[in-house]
Each structure stands twice: as structure tokens, then as C-alpha cells.
Image (cartoon, grey):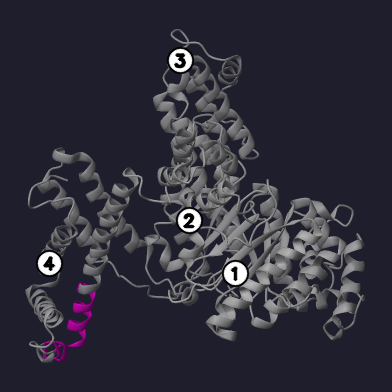
Amino acid sequence: MTQSPEFPHDRLRDEVRLLGALLGEVIRDEGGQDLYDRIEAVRRASVAYHRDPASDDASELERLLGELSLDQAIGLTHGFAAFSLLANVAEDRAGKRRAQAQAEAGERADTPEGVLKRLAQAGADRNAVRDLLAQALISPVLTAHPSEVRRKSVIDRTTAVGELLDGCDRDGIACNAETLKAALRRQIVILWATRLTRASALVVQDEIDTVVDWLQRIFLHVAPAQLAEWRRLLDAPDLTPFVRIGSWVGGDRDGNPNVDADTLRAAFRSQARAALGFYLDEVHALGAELSLSIDLTRVTPELAALAQGSGDASIQRADEPYRRALSQIYARLSAAHPALTGEPTPRPARFDAPAYDGPDAFRADLNILHDSLVRTHGAVFADDRLARLITAANVFGFHMATLDLRQNSDVHQRVVADLLKVAGVCPDYAALDEAERLAVLARELASPRPLFSPYADYAAETLKERAILQAAAEALSTFGPQAIRTHIVSKTDAASDMLEVYLLLKEVGLYDPADPGACPIQAAPLFETIDDLRAARATLERVLAEPSARAVAEARGVQEVMIGYSDSNKDGSYLTSGWELHEASRALLEVTRAAGVRLQLFHGRGGAVGARRRLRLLSGAGPARRHRRGPHPRHRTGRGHRQQIRRAGSGPTQPRRPDLRNPAGLAGAAVRRGLQRRARGRGRAPVGRLDEGLSGPRL
């Protein structure tokens, strides 16, 4: 944006005034002069009262509001709501400018530059950072939020306004003020005429669409760029991608009867549609760019073979091996699109080719191109668009985000009881005590015989749960082992709650009694109430004493456990909750150490608890920002263990969460504190995985 007084790009107040003035013009033209005058009168009275309530009482404001008819009140509310949305755009841009300035000055601890600067001051070298990040995993987890009322149409309009202003900043003096005004006014007209709230209740597909849109707009671009920055600063071009995205949307059915097998499939189809659409666009763009001719360059034998095997018969591209290879890659992606997404490819290939059966083959072909470019032309191609596409394929695969499953233990108990009763194994499973339940479950987990019969009658709940797990098995077969890795069990208070999950997984072929360690999904207990937290040690000890659960944990190397902040806070007060969470975390770590596996703690922080600022009680208590500085010193395992962080962000907080816009930066504080401790000899590597829900999954 130009530096003229009308369009200063570095002052929040002037930008708010610009957007407010344009909105005022739109209200006058679209809503009429009378509505505009009423909104202005209320605005002036509100400002006067806010600035000096002692000398200007609220009587004038009360009079203006009291005179409004219903239609006038609706128009006024709509006007102020639209203004707030536009002001938020300006505030977000101001925040980004401040963050950018801090990053350039090396003052942000959550950026690669800031982390390395602080580590250097603490005496840690970059080799230590490379070693730690080579073993790290950062996994932001996006959760559903049924109270999200904003429509995607509204989010799209405010995003468009922000992009127009951002574009003018990039253009600098080339940005035409009148052209910008006209473009902004067009978007504001659409926003004004758009219904801001939903006319009906949210359905699961709405939640899926919102989260996928967020992943598509932010993570697909930011994650590869962040990794490229770490690689550049650390001079580590082969640094393994350490960001994996997670989601609960479509798999979290605890308390939501609308989540079923169809929504699970819909979630993966929607995610795959976004991922493959991005890949197709990038491959298409690379095809337009890489016009290198075989008459003017050399290529590797692998690239020559890939180009030779292409179905591209165009005479114009006969001497362009990279374009021929990219045409083949595009055709194979295009062929995979319908089966993975349930929809035809938006821009079909010009010729038929066999579909990719998974992301590994796609990445392998891209690596052939990249290797040929780097080997024949050098480092100029080492970190380019193709390299970032390869990184994106490594991070997102075809599934885009790993989906967690979640269900209440009471549901599992009823379903298992139904299966056992119909199969004639146990007439009343619910009446058994814990030892008897474990004995029954252990026998069934050791038997290859399934309980379910397609010819028997079952409760609707049983059929629904089985169908969901069948859909999970299909997703794993289609998208690979990263598609689903964890089944969280809410309200866990006994070891049988975990074994019931493995029994249900056995019914759909995911748990094999002959090879239990090969089970692709691990059952993870969620300890929520004070009593559950106090019993967590005994419960997990009993779980890991069972051969089935122990085999899965040993094969994976970790046992994941989720601890709930919201319910424990409501159950026992903030202070008691913080203490019991801390004590449970220590106890769980001791149990997993004794079992020879690592502990993966998932901190499920409810919004009210995570937002508190008054107390910072030991580990796991106090505001979420404490955990951004790294795990508590007591949450550690031995040297060489892989550091992993999962962080959950829910519904309304996501679009304005700077930490979720910077997924690789989530590692910064934990890396800094971990290496500082190592440098000072104060401790060992942090716990295998710190899973932290900042604004709160539904607990």
C-alpha cells in the first residue's frame, strides 16, 4: 500500500477508518440514508459515553436504542457486526506486521531465527538443534467445536479483504489507491448482503469443511515453508519433516450422535480433495515452469526413463523431459482423485495413466525430478517449488491430517456386552467385576474367532460402532498407516476400557491375535475426573500388564495417555485439578518407564482452564502459554528419545491463532528449553510426546 495519508500501511487506526468509511458508504447505498443515520447516531453516542462516562451519561444512547423498531434494530446490529469483522481484519494485519518486525529482529522465540539466537546466547550450538529436530515431531491437532457459528462464506469475505490489503502492501507504490478502494468496496458489499449467522444448526460436514478450509489455506503452505527455513538456517537440507497435522473432526463421536461411518468417510474424502487438489495445481504449475529441453541440458537416467514412460504424446513437448514426466505424474494423480475423493478431477489429464496407489509412489516420482535438477544444475534447485511440494507430500500424504477416533467407555461396554451375549460367550458382561471382565476379554483377544455374525440381530448402537470401525479399516487401507493412529477412550476408569477397544478392532480385522503388535490403532485412555486421575497409575499398570495392550505399546514404542483439564477442574476446583494432573503425570511416567516404553501425554486443556492466568501450579497447571515454553522438568525420559508435541486448537480460536498459523514454530520454545537444560547439564531430553490441547477439545 502507498505511503499517502489516505492509505498508510503501518497504522491500525487509519486502516480501521478506511474500512469503516467504505462500510459506511455501502450501508448508505444498500441500506438507505435512514439506517446509516441511525447507526452513526448510536456510534457517536457510544463513543462519547465510552470516552467520558462521568460527563456524558448513557441517556442519549438509551433513547436512541429504545426508539428502534425490530427491523431497525436488526439493521443496526448487522452494521456493527460487519464493522467488527472488518476491524478484526485490520487488527490481524497489525499483529502480523508486529510479528514480522520481531521476527526480522530475531526477537520472537517461536521462530527459527529467534530460537537459534536464544540458544546461541545459552551456549548451545546448531549441531545440537539439528540432532534434536531430526528426532522431533510437532503435531497440531484441530478439534471440532459445535458452538462455531461463523459461516465459511463470511470467513471467505474477510479473508478476501485481508488479501487485498496484503497484496497492496506487496505492490508498494505500484498499488493504485482507487483500484484498491473499488476492490475493497466490492467485497464489503458482498459481506453486507451476506447472512452472518447460520440459519440452521451445524452438522458434522460443516465442521469438516471449516477445518479442511483452514488446513488448505494455512498448513499446506506454511508447513513446507517453515521446514525450508529450518533447513536453511541449520544448513541441513536433508532434515526430516517434523510436522504432522491431526484432527478430531469426523472421528470424535463422544457425545455427538451425528458422527458415524459416513462422516468418517466424508472427513477423509474432504481432506483428500484438498490435498490432491493442491498437488494437482502445483504439478500443473511446475509443468508450465520446467521447460528445459534435452537439447540444452542433461538429465539423470531415472528422469529419462520416467519421461520415456510418459503417455504424453505432444510433439511440442517431445524434447522436454521434465514436462513429459510431470504430465505423467499429473495423469496418475488425476486417476487417483475420483477413488479417494468421490468426485471427478477438476481438471482431468489429457491421457489415461495408472492411478497412484499411495503417496509413496507420488513422492518417489517427484524425487526423481528433484534429484535430476540438483545433480545437473546445482543448489539453485535445492529449495524451490518442487522441493516444497515434496515436503508437503511427506507431511500430508493423500490423507492430509491424521484423524483421531474418540468414544465414551460406556458405549464400548454396551457394544461388547451385546456382542458377547449374542455370540453366547457371556450373558451379562456388564454384571461382571473388573477381574472377570479382563479374563473374558483376554480369552477373546487370544482367539481368532470373531464374535459378530451377519445373520444375528444386534442393537443399533452396536451396528453403528462396528460400521465406524469398518470405515476406519477402509481408511487405513486406502490412505496408509498415518490416516488413523489413536482411539481415545473418554471416561476411562478401568483397564477393561482399553481392552474393549482392541476387541472391537479385532472384529473388523485391525487387531490380529497372532500378531497384536501390528495393530495400527492404539487405545489411549482419557483420565478426566479427580478420581480417575488418582487411579490412573493403577489403571495404566493393569493395562500394560495385559499382553494385548503391552504388545501394541512395545511395537509402537510409546503408550499415549490423555489427561483432561476441563472436567477435573469442574470436579475438584482449579487448585485441586492442577495438583492431581501433576501427580497423575508423574505416576504415569513411572509406570511407562517400568514397562520399558515411553509416555505420550496428551494435555486436553479446556478453554476456561487454559485461559486462566493467576496460577502456575507445577506441571500441567496454569495458562496454556506455560507449556509453550516447554515440558516441565519432571516430564522427561532418557536421552535419545524422540520429542513429540501435539497441540489441539478448537473451533472459534483457530482462524486468529498465530501459533496455529506457525506450526513449525510450535517446536521453538520446547527446543530452546530442552537444549538449554542439556547445555547446563540440568536434565535429560523431554518426555517422548507432550500433547497439549490449548483451547480445548470437548471434554
Residue at mark 3 to residue at mark 4: CA–CA distance: 57 Å
Residue at mark 2 to residue at mark 4: CA–CA distance: 34 Å
Q: Mark 4 points at which residue?
A: 24
Image coordinates of residue 516 in percent, x first then y, are 84, 55
* Side (left or right) of 253 relative to 381: right
Amino acid on which the number 4 mark rests in the picture: Gly
* Mark 3 in CB contact with mark 2 (< 8 angstroms): no
**Label 3 Cα neighbours within 10 Å, binned few <14 / some 14-19 / many ≥20:** few
Image coordinates of residue 231 in percent, x first then y, are 49, 35
Amino acid on which the number 2 mark rests in the picture: Val
Q: Name the residue under label 1.
A: 259
- Residue 10 lies in the magenta-colored region: no
Q: Which of marks 1 and 3 is in front?
A: 1
Q: Mark 2 points at which residue?
A: 212
Q: Where 647 falls versus 409 (above or below)?
A: above
Residue at screen point 43% across, 32% down: 385
Residue at mark 1 to residue at mark 3: CA–CA distance: 52 Å
Q: Which of marks 1 and 2 is nearer the N terminus?
A: 2
Residue at screen point 50% across, 14% down: 376
Q: Which of marks 1 and 4 is in front?
A: 4
Image coordinates of residue 484 in percent, x first then y, are 66, 55
Residue at screen point 42% across, 43% down: 117
Highlighted magenta segment, given as a residue range:
61-79
